[in-house]
Image (spheres, coloured by chain):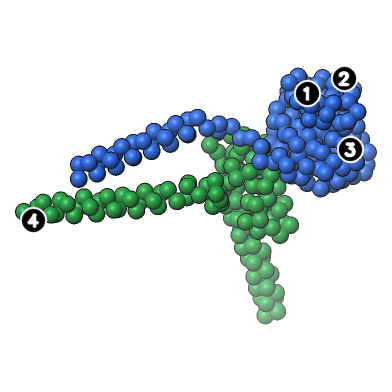
């Protein structure tokens, strides 16, 4: 019975360790995917095997081990390489249009369609 | 309604043309202009030929420092080396070398052959320290003042024109 308890404890601890490692790996992969490889053509850090990408991966892992969270790592790298390194740039004065234009166009399109449909239906009635 | 449709079409087409014009005329090559005016990181670096560390904060003792990232395996570094030798003759500027992802013996061989323009050389064996300086390839050169603020950053090998500009910036 004692052996079973010890085995269960070891098994639980092993699984806990594995799940932590897996979570950490998932987080680092997520971060790599959100970073642009500056020396590659349209590749993320996750996709690239370039020297630069390898170094950034290594730095990201170090920062995670130091206790930095995802946001802090993005801020650190954006401070060094500019927002260009981020695939999801933050909302700033310079990127304001980039973020709002799709919504503006969506609303304008909806208004245009509304009036077009209204006019069509009006004509059909007569 | 026809006038409205025409108006909207003109606005949309003009906007598309504007976006293409702006998009096609914008420089897509990454630069580090954003770093100008910002301070360099205060970090410890291992010296290449001494078994001690050097903190970049100590660079504030120099009027101007040119931080040059180089390696013996880097072709363009050889090309710019003669310009660094020329700049090293200027007393108002000190050149601090950071040897990147290189072997100590190879780096020393490189310097013995081409000359040593550096007053101090640090080693960044795995290239992780270079990330703190926003370096993504070598050679890269950063001109800083005694407040450790970046005055100019050069991506790629420096040439005659850059040397003239650097000398002008440091006031000869």
Residue drawn at the location 67% of the way across and 80% of the way down: A1
- Across and down, in percent, residue B130 comes to 75, 40
Q: Disc 1 on helix, strand or loop? A: helix
Q: To which residue does mark 1 refer?
A: B163
Asked if badges 2 and 4 are on one and the same chain, I answer no
Is label 2 or label 1 in front?
A: 1
Left/right of residue A60 with respect to residue A88 in the rendered view: right
Q: Disc 4 on helix, strand or loop? A: helix
Image quadrant holding the C terminus of chain B, namely: top right
What is chain B's hue in the picture? Answer: blue
Mark 1 Cα within 10 Å, few/some/many (few <14, many 20+)? Answer: some
Residue drawn at the location 61% of the way across and 35% of the way down: B30
Q: To which residue does mark 4 refer?
A: A125
Residue drawn at the location 40% of the way across and 52% of the way down: A103
- Across and down, in percent, residue A62 comes to 72, 51
Which chain: green? Answer: A
Left/right of residue B102 with respect to residue A108 in the rendered view: right
Q: CA distance from mark 2 to mark 1?
A: 22 Å
User: Is A7 located above or below residue B71 in the figure?
Assistant: below
Give me the chain letter of mark 3: B
> In this view of the protein, can residue B69 be seen by the observer?
no
Asked if badges 4 and 1 are on one and the same chain, I answer no
Q: CA distance from mark 4 to mark 1?
A: 79 Å
Q: CA distance from mark 1 to mark 3?
A: 18 Å
Mark 3 Cα within 10 Å, few/some/many (few <14, many 20+)? Answer: some
Looking at the image, tell me whether mark 2 or mark 3 is earlier in sequence order.
3
Q: CA distance from mark 2 to mark 4?
A: 91 Å
User: Which residue is farthest bottom?
Assistant: A1
């Amino acid at each position: 019975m004692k052996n079973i308890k010890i085995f269960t404890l070891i098994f639980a601890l092993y699984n806990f360790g594995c799940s932590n490692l897996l979570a950490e790996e998932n987080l680092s992969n997520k971060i790599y995917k959100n970073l642009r490889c500056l020396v590659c053509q349209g590749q993320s850090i996750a996709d690239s095997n370039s020297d630069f990408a390898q170094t950034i991966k290594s730095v990201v892992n170090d920062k995670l081990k130091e206790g930095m969270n995802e946001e802090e790592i993005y801020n650190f790298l954006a401070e060094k390489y500019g927002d260009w390194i981020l695939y999801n740039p933050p909302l700033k004065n310079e990127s304001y249009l980039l973020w709002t234009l799709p919504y503006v166009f969506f609303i304008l399109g909806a208004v245009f369609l509304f009036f077009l449909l209204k006019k069509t239906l009006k004509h059909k009635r007569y | 309604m026809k006038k409205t449709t025409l108006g909207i079409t003109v606005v949309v087409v003009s906007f598309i043309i504007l976006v293409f014009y702006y998009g096609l005329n914008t420089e897509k090559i990454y630069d580090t202009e954003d770093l100008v005016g910002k301070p360099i990181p205060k970090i410890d670096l291992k010296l290449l030929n001494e078994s001690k560390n050097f903190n970049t904060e100590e660079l504030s003792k120099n009027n101007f420092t040119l931080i040059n990232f180089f390696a013996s395996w880097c072709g363009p570094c050889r090309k710019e080396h003669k310009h660094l030798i020329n700049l090293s003759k200027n007393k108002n500027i000190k050149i601090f070398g950071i040897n990147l992802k290189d072997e100590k013996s190879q780096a020393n061989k490189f310097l013995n052959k081409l000359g040593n323009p550096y007053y101090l050389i640090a080693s960044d064996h795995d290239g992780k320290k270079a990330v703190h300086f926003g370096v993504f390839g070598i050679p890269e050169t950063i001109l800083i003042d005694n407040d450790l603020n970046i005055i100019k950053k050069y991506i790629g090998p420096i040439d005659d024109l850059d040397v003239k500009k650097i000398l002008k910036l440091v006031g000869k």
